[in-house]
Structures are given as C-alpha cells and as structure tokens.
Image: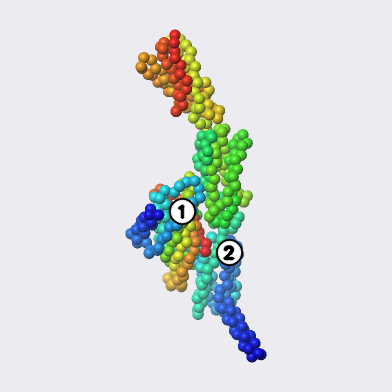
Amino acid sequence: MITRWAFLLSGMGLVLMQLAFAEERGMRLPKAVEAGDAFSIQSAGSEKATLYIIGPEQVLKREIQTGETTLFPAGALYNAGHYLAVLIGDSSTETGSFDVVPSSKPADLSFLARPSRLQVGIHDGITGAVYLFDAYHNLIVAPTSVSFELSNPSGTVEKRIMVTRDGAAWTGMDSTAQQGIDKFVARSGGISSTRIVRQVPGDPCELKMSARQAGKQVQLATEPVRDCNGNAVPDGTIVTFTATYRGLQSTVDVPLKRGFAEVQMAEHSGAMFSVASGVVLGNQIRWDK
Amino acid sequence: MLKRLLILCAIFAVATCSGFSQATVRVEPARLQGPRTLPEQTEAAAIRDYLQSWQSLRAALEQNRSDMLDLSFVGTAKDKLADTIQQQAALGICTRYQDRAHDIQIVFYSPEGLSIELTDKVDYDVQVLDHGKVKTTQHVSARYFIVLTPTEVRWRVRVFQAAS
C-alpha cells in the first residue's frame, strides 16, 4: 500500500515538474492588450536575444536578456491588431501571438449624413451612419450605444438610440413638417458630431388665381403659394399661366416673387385661363366680357 | 446561389490573371445592416478590390515602399501601414505576407452608399527578415474588419484592422 502511494506521488511530481519546465521555457504573453496600454513579456533562460513584435499595423524590435521581464511603456503599441511575438536567441526561437484591442472609449466618430437638403415631410428621408474610433483611430468593434438626434428651430427633437455592430450604426429619420435648418447630431461616449440638414418646402399643394381687368389686358394673380404643410414655396419657383382661345394656346412662365406670381395676358371674351406649377394644377377661369 | 458562385468564379479569374496568390476565397452571404440593398456588381467589385489590396500590402511591406499602398489604401489604413513601413525600414526589417485563405462576409453598406464594411477570416503566412536574413515564418489566422470607400475607379481600404 505504501509503495503504491509512493509511486503515485512520484508520478504526480514528475508531471508537475514537466509543467513547470514548459512554462519556464515559454514566453509569457498577454492574451490581449488595450491599445496604448503598457504591457510586459516574460521569457525564460539567460542569454541575449532579439524580440520582434510583428503585425501589418505596427512593428517593434527589442534586444533583450532572456529571463528578464521586457516592459513596453504606455503608447508603445497603439494600433489594434493581431501581433506575432518572435523571440530569437542564439540557441532557440520562440513564438506566440496576442491581440491589441481598441479602447472601449470613443474618441472620434465618422458621421455620414445625407442629404444636406431635402423637402419637408419625407419619411426616412434623412439617413445617418456612424463608425466609432478610439483615441488611436482604431475601429471600436464592441457593441456601443450611439444616439442620433434631429432637431429643428421650433424645438422638435427626433431621437434614436442605436447600438453599433462591427463598429457601425445607422438610422433613418423623417424630415419634419416645418421648413428650416435642422441639426443632425450623432453622439457616443461624450463625443458628438453635427451635420446641418436644410429642410425646404415641398411642391405647391394648391394653386388659386384670380383675374381682373387691367386696361385692355387681363391681370392674373395667384394667392400666396404654399406646400401641403403650409410652408411658403420659395421665390423663383416657376408658375405657368396658360390662355386658350379658339383652339390657340399661349403660355407664360413666371417665377414666384414674394410668394405670388402674376402676369398680364391678352383679353379675349371666351378665353380660358389656367395655372399650374410642376405637377400641380390650379383653378381655371373663363373670361366673359 | 448560382449568381454568388459566378461572382466567386469571377473573383478567382481576376485573381489568377493578375498573378495573385493561390489563396482560396469563400464569400459568405451578406449579413447586411442598413436600408440599402447591395447590387451584385458592387459586391463583386468591392471584394475584388479588397483581395487586390493584399497584393499591395504584400509588395509594400516586403519592399518597404509606402507608395505601393496608394492603389488600394486610403485614409487611416494607408497612414498606419505607411507608419509600419517606416518602422520596418528604421529597424532593418521587412516582412512577407502571403494570404492563403479568405472567408469574407459583407456586414454593412452605409445608407448613402459611401462605405462598405466586411469581415474576413484570413489565413496567411508571415515571414520576418532582419537585414535580409529570414528569421522566422509563421502561419497566422485572424479576423479582419475592413471598411472600403469608393474612389474614382475602385474601392479602397480605409480601415484595416485585425483581431484573433
């Protein structure tokens, strides 16, 4: 019985010795290092060697004494990536790998917002996409909250909270009913980026004109032209007046001026006048004198 | 499925014709977030240009010439790789990267169409040379996050970042 226990204990001792030997021979690498943080690499032995840290993102080389701890100060390795550690001595070569991971704290966000100008009342008409980066401009791939806010001068705020996937997040926003200059803000971890979105009136919604005698001509004038949300259609928008008489048609294009369009056309009893802007048709007036 | 296979074959053909390595390329179905659909031609062009970026990377890091990055890289990715080249040159090192296998998936096509993000599980070999002498050759598997942006005639890599 005593012999059996002695055999088992000696066997366990041998296994423990082998584990210790394996650890002693190997390089001890961190599994992951946050970008820009200090870290150290331990090696076994007692000879001069060269330690290479190799990646497409960054390269380091140190002449070291094995058996000592090699310290890399803060800021030595700052580009996120997968790195090889290669230790080459006179008698041996050891290799390993580790990751440099981005900091979880955003320091920069790349904010793409479109369009910079659009009509009011468009569902999901405004889109914003964000990529999040840390202080070393590494893409933060861990899920992170991003808030998107669209605010207009009247104080209306549309807000969405999204979570990044693989470093990216996006949202769609409705343009509001009121024209004006809106601020589109993306925010994460205390940093923000702002884009300006100009919301302009839509197409004219309803056109109404009146007619009156003006000497030997007819004066045609619209009422103030507005879109379907009540926003004044901008000056310069073309309004087309058409007169039809005995199968002949004459047309005049007039830009809006101070919200109105007006024109004088030839007077013929029985003539039919109509008004249009874009695809919107206004009222018709038959001129009988 | 057949169309995807055709895209893949086209990529292989381009790769082979251009003397690219014998890397195997697998394209997973896109796992897109975002409202914009990704046309097949755009997908094929982005993947083709991305695969070619490995050639640029290889040549630039092997010859320590940052101008060889110009074709395929832009912005942060180009700056970081150019810094690596500068570090290599200062240390007397050069590295040879040889991609062996790609497993690509497109994960984001931004709504305005100005960026495509993909992930790539890459198998590659890296050889380290110090003052012209080969020090080691290692096989590496890593997952890359890639952001591509359109330029005049091609997609260029703007973010090139690995994790294990």
Mark in the foreground, 1 or 2: 1
* Labels 1, 2: one chain: no
Q: Amino acid at mark 2?
A: Val
Number of dots carrying numbers: 2
- Location of residue B113 in the rendering, given as x and y in whole percent from the top left corner: 46, 46
Q: Chain of mark 1?
A: B
Q: Which residue occupies 45% across, 10% down?
A: A215
- Look at the numbered disc 2 and give the secondary structure of its residue: strand
Q: Is residue A238 above or below residue A168?
A: above
Q: Which residue occupies 54% across, 64% down?
A: A99
Q: Which residue occupies the foreground of this view, B28 or A41?
A: B28
- Location of residue A204 in the rendering, given as x and y in whole percent from the top left corner: 50, 27
Q: From mark 1 to mark 2, how far is it between C-alphas?
A: 31 Å
Mark 2 crowd level (few <14, some 14–19, many ≥20, 10 Å Cα): many
Q: Amino acid at mark 1?
A: Ala
Q: According to the image, what is the colour scheme of the structure?
A: rainbow
Q: Which residue occupies the foreground of this view, A75 or B154?
A: B154
- Location of residue B151 in the rendering, given as x and y in whole percent from the top left corner: 42, 49
* Residue found at the very far top of the displayed protein: A289
Q: Which residue occupies 42% across, 48% down?
A: B39
Mark 1 crowd level (few <14, some 14–19, many ≥20, 10 Å Cα): some
| Position of the N terminus of chain A by quadrant | bottom right
Q: Which residue occupies the foreground of this view, B7 or B23?
A: B7
| Position of the C terminus of chain A by quadrant | top left
- Location of residue A148 in the rendering, given as x and y in whole percent from the top left corner: 58, 45
Q: Is residue A107 above or below residue A223?
A: below
Q: Which mark is residue B30?
A: 1
- Look at the numbered disc 1 and give the secondary structure of its residue: loop
Q: Which mark is residue A33?
A: 2
